[in-house]
Amino acid sequence: MAAEDRRSNVVTIDGPAGVGKSSVARRVAERLRFFHLDTGAMYRTVTLAASRAGVASAEAVDAARLAPVLERWVVSRRMRVGAGGRVWLDDEEVSDEARSAAVTALVSPVSALPSVRALLVEWQREIALAEAARAGGVVVEGRDAGSYIFPHARWRFYLDASLLERARRRLKQDARPQAVPAEEPHQLTATMEGLAQRDRIDRERTVAPLCVPDGATVLDTTHLTLDEVVSAICKSVEPGRGGAP
């Protein structure tokens, strides 16, 4: 796997919740004309399927009863994954539902299960290497993309930002025209608490915890615009994208 990581045009973008990985990864992939693989969307879709099956709720995740869900959707490949985080369960596109608040509340405990991570990481490697060969490159976004899925990827980045800024971004992302303004203090506080809890779960899980990958380029995006982050990544990748390192 290490040799394939280095030969392929694989870009990994990791970071905590709310830092803006999806927006950055999507723009980077568009600019480089690479395939964009959102690994978080895959975990969200498994979580949605588990919730529908009644084996994941706010109270607990029933790991023992999760096996048939994984068999049905992951092992059989009946869950489909497209560019930019689009996902399907059979022919039903569930991209929006997989990003709902209800799924967000459950995704960290579900994705922390070793059985879930083992199956999805294997599939993510399969998809990424196939798309890198087909499209000329792939941008893999997640919380363990550069530390665990592709630890020897040619380009590895870790995005970070202050908790306050991440909360503001998350509220802006979730905002609707009729919503309460995102800067209301109680909304910011609640969102910061939710992000901090997710950070803790992601960093303390036993398999592939959230961390800065060895050798990764760390970008503190607190005071950077989306375009500035995208430009910084593309400037690092573009000179060497055509050949072996």
Image (cartoon, helix red, strand yellow):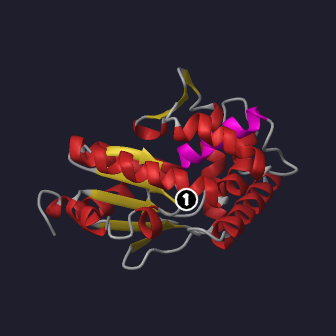
Q: Which residue is drawn at 54% across and 44% down?
A: 42
Q: Residue at x 54, y 24 (%)?
A: 90
Q: Which of 133 and 123 is in front in this view?
A: 123
Residue at the farthest left position: 243
**Is residue 195 shown left or right of residue 128?**
right
Residue 100 shows up from this direction: no
Q: Residue at x 56, y 32 (%)?
A: 95
User: What amino acid is labelled 1 in the image?
Assistant: Val
Which quadrant holds residue 33? top left
Q: Position of residue 60 (x, y in %)?
A: 84, 52
Q: Position of residue 218 (x, y in %)?
A: 42, 73
Quadrant including the N terminus: bottom left
| Residue 45 is covered by the magenta coloring | yes
| Mark 1 element type | loop
Residue that label 1 marks: 19
Q: In this view, does 79 lie above or below 44?
A: above
Residue at the farthest top position: 91
Which quadrant holds residue 206? bottom right
